[in-house]
Amino acid sequence: MPETTTATAALPVVVIGAGPVGLAAAAHLTERGLTPLVLEAGPRVGTAIRDWGHTRLFSPWRYDIDAAAARLLENEAWTAPDPDALPTGIELVEQYLEPLAAALSGRLRTGARVVAVSRAGMDKTRTANRAQTPFLVRLQGTDGALEDVEASAVIDASGTWARPNPLGRAGLPAAGEDEAVAAGRITAPLPDVTGRDRDRFAGRHVLVVGAGHSAANTLLELGALAETEPGTRISWAVRSADVTRVYGGEGRDELAARGALGTRLRHLVESGVIDVHTSFTITGFSTDDDGLTVRAATPTGQEQLEVDLLVPATGFRPDLAMLSELRLDLDPAVDAPKRLGPLIDPEFHSCGSVAPHGEKLLAHPEAGFYIVGMKSYGRAPTFLMATGYEQVRSIAAALAGDRAAADDVRLVLPETGVCSTDLGGSCDLPAPGSAQDGAEAQGCCTPQAAEEPADACCPAPQPATFGRAPLPLLSSSCC
């Protein structure tokens, strides 16, 4: 927490990103008597969510609204959605985020892309009076002009949607990957297969790569498309030795819609609608007018697939370039805050087994700077937005000087029956014993032995709590 001085007391707390967690941060700051300034790179709130707005969330509306945001909206002419309905991403934006942005009128700027964060008048090497010096946030408007804004504190809730993981091995793009993207043969994550993008996929051979909920959603949409569009073929490639863990907890999942996702996917695989390629590590692409050739290493040697389109669902990673002048302390494995990293490493944790955490675990050597939301999890795919709501509640309390409230972090998330819940993660690994980069069996996402209990690596489901009230639970922003 930064030391308050006369120079910084009147400055706003800059929040980067106007998604659910960023706007929740603004609501909590407002409730604490602090002045937020939300900077959103896109033209409207929820820019990233609009890209996957056709996708339905796992949790009903009663769990999808932050507590401080709800209290703020109660003062406005806002009609709360049906608490038992399951919203799509675009419904979340239109029925919740847009009214919340209106309630925060004057504290939100769109078309303001943050390109750098530093301290006013000093670079990363300067120490004297650093904590008492205002932050300098450099933003770029839609006309390309640069503007510097000073802040008393900065909360980075910019997410990871803009930086999908590459498809190649070792965390690097495969040969020809950039060219395949430029040629339109590799799509954006979570395309609207049965809606606005239907003509692009109908009657085509489509390969989905990834082992999380985003892959499952796309595969289910392709399955629905194949029922009405003859010639539509579906292939699914993963680096793991089997896909059973992608089915998740099914009937054991505390979020019924998420459990149903796995059950429907398993049916499509077992009925042969989806052609599965396991232990499949992509090594290169070739693009021509006829389609895309995907080359891969497998335990039995080299393999290649001829497809029309490839949908990537291999996760995301944070963009840390704009923070290069700040003193950060990041976990070397997952690029999360160092003290949080071991708690969320997807080789050992699911979203339901992450310990409660707030301002203390999210703090950096740069006093007054925090990374929250999906970006706070770095490369870990197990984030739930309810976690982000508790993060920003704790941080707002700390910035307001309420140490007791900041430290009183209470968060118990429901178990899913799987170890990795979204976007690749540690379950998207080479098969044990395969000749792919010498990979060994890793964590609880390796194939189960016959005698191993289904939940051997994951704790039993626990009731969700948030202080004394039920915890609002959302799927992650990428479902």
Image (cartoon, rainbow, N blue to C red):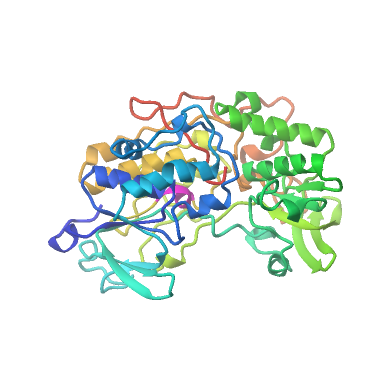
- Give the mark count: 0
Please check the rendered image and state whether residue 373 is part of the magenta-colored stretch, yes or no: yes
Q: Is residue 63 above or below residue 314?
A: above
Magenta span: 372-377
Residue 460, position as x, y percentages in the image: 54, 24
What's the residue at 39%, 76% (across, down)?
145
Left or right: residue 467 versus residue 419 is left
Q: Quadrant of residue 149?
A: bottom left
What's the residue at 86%, 45% (across, down)?
230
Main secondary-structure element of the magenta-colored stretch: helix
Q: Is residue 87 above or below residue 134?
A: above
User: Seen from this angle, which residue lies furthest bottom?
Assistant: 145
Left or right: residue 209 versus residue 408 is right
User: Seen from this angle, which residue lies furthest front?
Assistant: 77
What's the residue at 48%, 24% (across, down)?
462
Residue 404, position as x, y percentages in the image: 23, 37
* Residue 360 visible from this viewpoint: no
Residue 429, position as x, y percentages in the image: 68, 48
What's the residue at 72%, 45% (across, down)?
240
Along the line of sight, which residue is nearer the eye, 264 or 125? 264
Report the quarter where the C terminus lies: top right
Q: Quadrant of residue 8?
A: bottom left
Residue 365, position as x, y percentages in the image: 32, 58
* Residue 141 visible from this viewpoint: yes
